[in-house]
Amino acid sequence: MRQTILLSALASGVLTGCANDGDDYTLYRGSVTGPMRIHVASFDSADGEAYNRENCHIAAGLFQAQPGVAVKYWCEKGRYRE
């Protein structure tokens, strides 16, 4: 019984940590073949929203600055969604 309560409390804590996507940012890119929104990376560090946002924008800028890149990269607040 005690083991069940402990496992239940542990699982609840893990799921609670996973459910908070308010600080997450996701990097997307377009496509040269038509309008598309393609997932590139997720930024979900425990260091907070500002940290995730900044790193996403840095990554987008680095991808965009590569020679010959013809697609757009951008960041959106929140977890990946289609």
Image: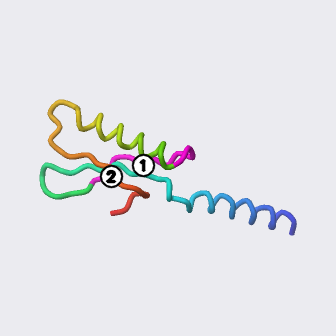
In the rendered image, residue 31, in percent from the top left (x then y), is placed at 18, 50
Q: Is residue 73 above or below residue 78?
A: above
- Rendered residue at 34%/48% (across/down): 27
The part of the image, by quadrant, that contains residue 58 is top left
Q: Amino acid at mark 1?
A: Ser
Q: Is residue 56 above or below residue 15?
A: above
Observer-nearest of 37 and 25: 25
Crowding near the residue tagged with mark 1, few <14, some 14–19, many ≥20 C-alpha atoms within 10 Å: some
Observer-nearest of 4 and 77: 77
- Rendered residue at 41%/41% (across/down): 54
Tags 2 and 1 in contact by the CB under 8 Å rule? yes
Q: Quadrant of the N terminus?
A: bottom right
Q: Which region shows up in magenta?
A: 38-48
Task: Classify mark 2: helix, strand or loop.
Answer: strand
In the rendered image, residue 47, in percent from the top left (x then y), is placed at 56, 44
Q: Which mark is residue 42?
A: 1
Crowding near the residue tagged with mark 2, few <14, some 14–19, many ≥20 C-alpha atoms within 10 Å: some
**What residue occupies the far right of the structure in this picture?**
2
Q: Determine which residue is flagged by label 2.
A: 39
Q: Quadrant of the C terminus?
A: bottom left
Q: Amino acid at mark 2?
A: His
In the rendered image, residue 20, in percent from the top left (x then y), is placed at 55, 60
Q: Tell me if 80 is positioned left or right of 18 in this view.
A: left
